Image (spheres, rainbow, N blue to C red):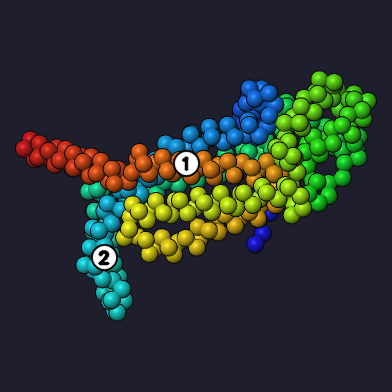
Amino acid sequence: MDFSFVTMASQSVSNGWAIFKPLYWFFGKCMEGLLYAFNDKYFLALIVFTILTRLVLFPLNLRQQKTMAKTNRIQPKIQKIQKKYNVNAITDPKQRQKANQAMQEEMQALYAREGHNPMNMGCGPMAFQMVFLMGIIGIIYYPVEYILNIKISEYQDKIVDIINFKATGTNRYLQLDLIRNISEYKETLLANSAKVGNIFTESSIAKIEAFKDGLNFFGIDMSQVPTWKGIIVIIPILCLVTSIGSTIVSTLIQKKNNPAASQQQSQMMIMMLMMPLFSFYISFKLPAAVGFYWVISNLVAIVQQLVMAKFFPPKRNIAREMVENTIERRSREESIKKMKNN
């Protein structure tokens, strides 16, 4: 499979995809503040940033769970309607179409009574997670521009010539190369700073050097793209393990809350395991910082799922939904009676 769209998306800043620039700017400012708070310790800033983004997503995840609880609550009624019409058992095409139409009309009436929209299955959390991932990829690939506020994008071609940068293999991104090799480039950049708008000064070089030091996580340079050689391979492995762990915890909780769907969930388990394998593969294509973000995100997701299962159990949500639905239905009935009496 070709997952090149991920790296293509990561190049959106330098390619001028304006739609993403406000996102990268905002995320860059957040990381800048966290780096200041944690004395330029990048991995600590990224951990806190990941936790904060997960907290922002928590209400959306809770809403998704409530939507699923409502779906589970009316599932017996849906099955009763399906059994009543038994469309699949009808051989005559015209009769089948007629029965199917009648079944759909009765289901729509059920949804209207229950105040349930089957199309609204809570895709918000997944969409927001993709948005956050895009922001993370942007500030990881372009930290000099968006975190350190050294505006190098308009001078990129000149900087490439000054340091004789060659984009090959995993070394394809100028800003990451500047950070990794700042000690080697320092004198050259200072000597040629006038050619690039004097953006490279002793102060700006010191910021890049401090940032490079903060990228070191127990001997792992998180600006590097992981390979099978060296300790850096632990990042993709942890990414795979924590992603599988998150999937298993989610599946076990769903089975406990909805035993009737356990067989279907077992079949879905195979598909759900594709995401861990996907993240494992992609973690060898992106800087280790992206994989590190996924590891922390997966760990926080596991804790979040356990917290939701304990303090916001679906059964409690179902009971609350039933009470709210009953109150709403009685209110509608009272309104209809008043209208008839008038």
Q: Position of residue 180 (x, y in %)?
A: 81, 37
Q: Position of residue 205 (x, y in %)?
A: 82, 25
Cα distance between the residues tagged 1 and 2: 38 Å
For disc 2, the marked residue is 82
Q: In percent of the image, x 35 and y 49: which residue is there?
A: 68
Q: Which mark is residue 108?
A: none
Q: Secondary structure at mark 2?
A: helix
Name the residue rendered at 27%, 76% in the picture: 90
Locate residue 273 relative to residue 338 in the image: left or right. right
- The disc at residue 303 is 1
The answer to whether residue 280 shows anywhere in this view is yes
Question: Compared with residue 262, is residue 242 higher up or lower down, i.e. above or below?
Answer: above
The image quadrant of residue 333 is top left
Q: Secondary structure at mark 1?
A: helix
Residue 21 lies left or right of residue 56; in this view the side is right
Image side of residue 217 versus residue 209, left or right: left
| Between 141 and 250, the one nearer to me in the picture | 250
Identify the residue at horizontal 52%, vertical 51% (top origin). Answer: 245
Where is residue 108, by image quadrant? bottom left
Residue 164 lies, with reference to residue 84, above or below; the image says above
Q: Nearer the viewer, residue 22 or 290?
A: 290
From the image, state whether disc 1 or disc 2 is nearer to you: 1
In the rendered view, does 26 fall on the left or right side of 89? Answer: right
Q: Quadrant of residue 326?
A: top left
Measured from the top left, where is residue 9 in percent x and y?
Answer: 66, 46
